[in-house]
Amino acid sequence: MEKMKRILMILLAALGIVGAGAVAAVIFLDINLKEVIAQEEKEPTAEELAARSFSMEPLTTNLTSENYAVVQLNLLADSEKSYKELEVRTPELKAIVISTLAGLSRDDLKGSEGLTNFAKTIQAEANKILHDGQVERVLITDFKIQ
């Protein structure tokens, strides 16, 4: 009986130590997880955004209607590496913008909804050609239809 009490006491002590270790590990992981989440949610600085912001030169092309459009875009890459890829792929990006506009009419580009749809299309097509990262946002910085 005495031997059983010792075994039981040792077993309870071992379980207590393992339990305390598990609690400490959970607390430690929770603190580290909160730090990681806080770092990911931190808004980028203006300098960081500028380093990832790729401005295209103005492009002019015909629309399906009897008009033509002049557009200038700014593409925000998700990293400096993808920014550099945008620079290298400038001819492909120009082709995407021109072919997209060539398939649209003046009415397709009317209002904020039309421009938003155009920007989303450019973003999706640009992301198809990128291997290192993605375009997070497309800004239309100049737009004219004549």
Image (cartoon, helix red, strand yellow):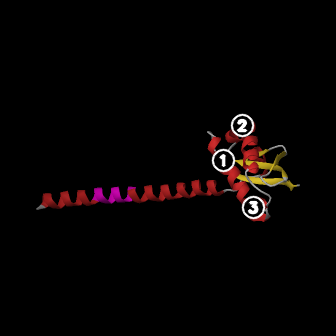
Q: Nearer the viewer, residue 108 or 134?
A: 108
Q: Name the residue under label 3.
A: 114
Numbered disc 1: secondary structure: helix
- The residue lying at 39 percent from left, 57 percent from top is 22
- The residue lying at 74 percent from left, 64 percent from top is 113
Q: Mark 1 points at which residue?
A: 125
Image spot of residue 48 (x, y percent): 74, 47
Q: Quick one: which residue is furthest to the right in this view?
A: 146
Q: Is residue 52 something one can see in this rendering?
A: no
Q: Which is nearer the N-term, disc 1 or disc 3?
A: 3
Q: Does the magenta stretch include residue 20?
A: yes
In the rendered view, does 14 fall on the left or right side of 1? right
Q: Is residue 137 magenta?
A: no
Name which quarter of the figure residue 81 lies in: top right
Q: Which amino acid does label 2 sit on?
A: Arg
What segment is highlighted magenta in the picture?
13-21
Q: Mark 2 points at which residue?
A: 89
Say the numbered circle drawn on residue 10. Answer: none
Q: Nearer the viewer, residue 135 or 105?
A: 105
Q: Quick one: which residue is furthest to the top in this view?
A: 88
Name which quarter of the figure residue 56 lies in: top right
- With respect to residue 8, does 76 lie above or below? above
CB atoms at circles 1 and 3 under 8 Å apart? no
Crowding around mark 3 (Cα neighbors within 10 Å: few <14, some 14 to 19, many 20+) is some
